[in-house]
Amino acid sequence: MDCVEAADEGADALQAGRPIVLVVDDEIGILTAIRRCLRSIPAEVVTAESAGEAIAFLHDNPVAVVVSDHMMPGMTGLELLALVRQNWPRTLGIMMTASGDIQLAADAVNRRLVRAFLTKPWTVDALRVAIREALEAWQAAGPDAGEGLRNGLAEAVRQQATRAVLALARAMDARDRYTRNHSERVAGLAVALGRAFMLPPQTLEALRVGGLLHDVGKIGVGDAVLLKPARLSAEEFEAIRRHPGTGASIVEPLGLAEEVVAVIRQHHENHDGTGYPDGLAGDQIHLLARLVHVVDAYEAMRANRVYRTAREPEWIRAELLRCRGTQFEPHLLDLFLAELEAGRIDAALVEADGVALGLQPALSSPPSSPAG
Ligand SMILES: [Fe+2]
């Protein structure tokens, strides 16, 4: 039976409003036998001769239960059921395995890929009972079943990636005692300014990650330059100017959102086009990068650095205003200064230092809404 035939059967099942049971086995004789056995089941039984056929069918049809053989060419039953679990979390899996495949069974159970196991040679009754139970569970779970799992998986992946990102940022900050927590502070300040800008929660999350990672390319700058307690030579400054591009290359394998990479690459671009590395100007620079540029400069000026002590608040304010319209976009800078005046910037700094000390689980929960 080919895939087209399977899809047609699924369409009929949809019209009939009955749940679909998809049976996958590369032996046609077994498929034929199973179809015969399942005539009394209150479902449409559809068969596929390979995992590929099954996946093509799943793309177009709401399948209640997948019953799969394990040993199939191309993709094993376990791999198929893992895909099903990830992409169609409402669909339940039943695995048919050769007897003695204990390790396989344990693996599938541990990964919560299957609802039931049938060990060959299975009996007709055992197959019917397993499918009936799975259908009842599928119906009882309702149409939203699996959404929690899908969201949970997405959240787990997000947290894993974010933790990898934080480890990178901390590795970088750890090189210089003067810039310790700089990344966390910039991330916290950027989110505070982003909230004032009414950015949506997902964008704030990108901003946070971008803030954490903005200077990750400094990993590629030697200590002699990075920690030099004196003015840099032209050559040394050139090494520093490479860090945004280096950073963007470093995070490339992480598959981070485009705007996060933009923050890393563009956070030293100036509003008037005199920045680096690409000399972008105005709205050629990503909004999030423009935003991080302002808070990065503020944080750098208010912190002790290896080559100078922290600046006074009034001096910083005057310096920011001096660079209004050249280094910084005027509107964004005005918003930042208003937030600074209202005390929300320094409050965000205190919060960021709490996060850096592990007092607050900033990475285990997304930032609250702009209104919050
Ligand atoms: Fe930087």
Image: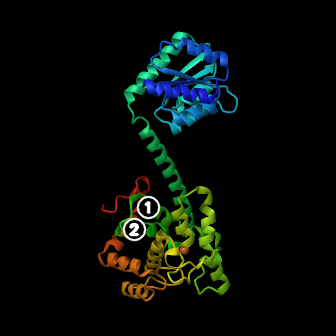
Compute the Cα span from label 2 to label 1.
8 Å
The vertical placement of 342 against 59, above or below, is below
Task: Please tell me in which quadrant of the rendered image residue 276 appears.
Answer: bottom right
**In this figure, which residue is indicated by the disc labeled 2?**
194
Q: Residue at x 61, y 78 (%)?
A: 241
Sequence-wise first label, 2 or 1: 2
Taking the image in four quarters, ligand 1 sits in the one at bottom right
| Residue 186, position as x, y percentages in the image | 45, 70
Is residue 147 left or right of 223 when viewed as pictured?
left
| Residue 161, position as x, y percentages in the image | 53, 53
- The front one of 11 and 72 is 11
Q: Could you classify mark 1 by the number of other residues whose Cα lies within 10 Å: few (under 14), some (14-19), or many (20 or more)?
A: some
Q: Could you classify mark 2 by the number of other residues whose Cα lies within 10 Å: few (under 14), some (14-19), or many (20 or more)?
A: many
Q: Residue at x 56, y 32 (%)?
A: 57
| Residue 308, position as x, y percentages in the image | 50, 84
Task: Please tell me in which quadrant of the rendered image residue 235 appears.
Answer: bottom right
Tell me if residue 357 can be seen. Answer: no
Q: In which quarter of the image is the C terminus?
A: bottom left
Ligand 1 closer than 8 Å to label 2 CB? no
**In this figure, which residue is indicated by the disc labeled 1?**
203
Is residue 236 left or right of 63 when viewed as pictured?
right
The vertical placement of 159 against 73, above or below, is below
* Kind of residue at badge 2: Gly
The secondary structure type at the circle numbered 2 is helix
The secondary structure type at the circle numbered 1 is helix
* Kind of residue at badge 1: Thr
User: Do the residues under discs 2 and 1 have CB atoms within 8 angstroms?
Assistant: yes
| Residue 96, position as x, y percentages in the image | 59, 21
